[in-house]
Image (cartoon, rainbow, N blue to C red):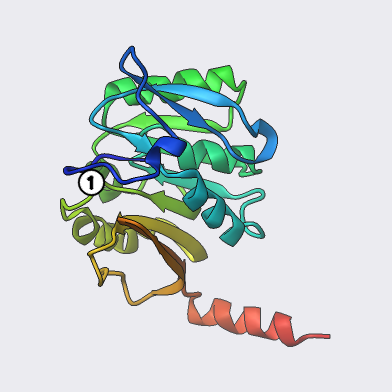
Amino acid sequence: MARRKPGPRKSGAGASGNAGQHGSGELRIIGGDWRSRKLRFPNAGGVRPSPARIRETLFNWLSYHLAGSDCLDLFSGSGALGLEALSRGAAQVTLVDHTPALAQALRENLRLLKSEKGTVICQDIERFLSHRQQAPFDIIFMDPPFRQGWLDKLFPLLESEHWVKPRGWIYVEHESELRTLPAPASWELHRQKTAGQVTYNLYRVKAEPEEEQTYSTHVRSP
């Protein structure tokens, strides 16, 4: 996942990706089967990968939930989060970005990695989320362009269209000056940190009442 936002780029981003002389950037996968693999992506629209230190924290948070999971990476950009998830054991990742050049680069990088576990969709994110035509996901990564009101538009769609399974996870990056997020009542904030201009959050969807009862009974059983 990568960021498109107006204004100055945040300090430290260059540690994870930098624009090359030929209009491209570089992504380094930091963990899992593809650790240290370097991938190229077009420098389209100011896209840059989430910094390595943020990715490391995120995947530490998800370390017990990632293996075998079905993930959705919205605003994929360079694929920093979706490809990292695949490297660390996700069963399947759907990567969605509206920029054709970035979508094509994602497909090429999946071929380079010899992975058939990633599906790339080139479509407007709001249109994609408006009509769910597939099973809900275990984990959703979302790093939208900053200061454009995307979370106000997309959070209600994620909830109304039931994009996340009960007890599933939603990861969100946003500008640090945004103090309050319009998170649905069914989401519980599990973790939150700020690094410079970026605040990153991990939410968990509450279980349905009958599922919560089953879960509680299972936990109490000897």
Q: Image point 16% across, 55% down: which residue?
A: 149
Bin the neighbour count of mark 1 within 10 Å (Cα to Cα): few under 14, some 14-19, many 20 and up.
few
- Residue sitting farthest toward the front: 11
Q: Quadrant of residue 85?
A: top right
Q: Is residue 15 visible?
A: yes
* Front-most of residues 57 and 100: 57
Q: Which residue is identified by label 1?
A: 126
Residue 27: x %, y % from top left: 47, 30
171 to 100, vertically: above or below: below
Residue 19: x %, y % from top left: 35, 24
Q: How many marks?
A: 1
Residue 76: x %, y % from top left: 38, 38
* Front-most of residues 17 and 70: 17
Q: Is residue 92 visible?
A: no
116 to 74, vertically: above or below: above
Residue 15: x %, y % from top left: 46, 37
Q: Image point 53% across, 36% down: which residue?
A: 83
Q: Image point 25% across, 71% down: which residue?
A: 179
- Residue sitting farthest toward the right: 222
Q: Is residue 153 left or right of residue 90?
A: left
Q: Quadrant of residue 158?
A: bottom left
Say which amino acid is labelled 1.
Glu
- Residue sitting farthest toward the top: 22
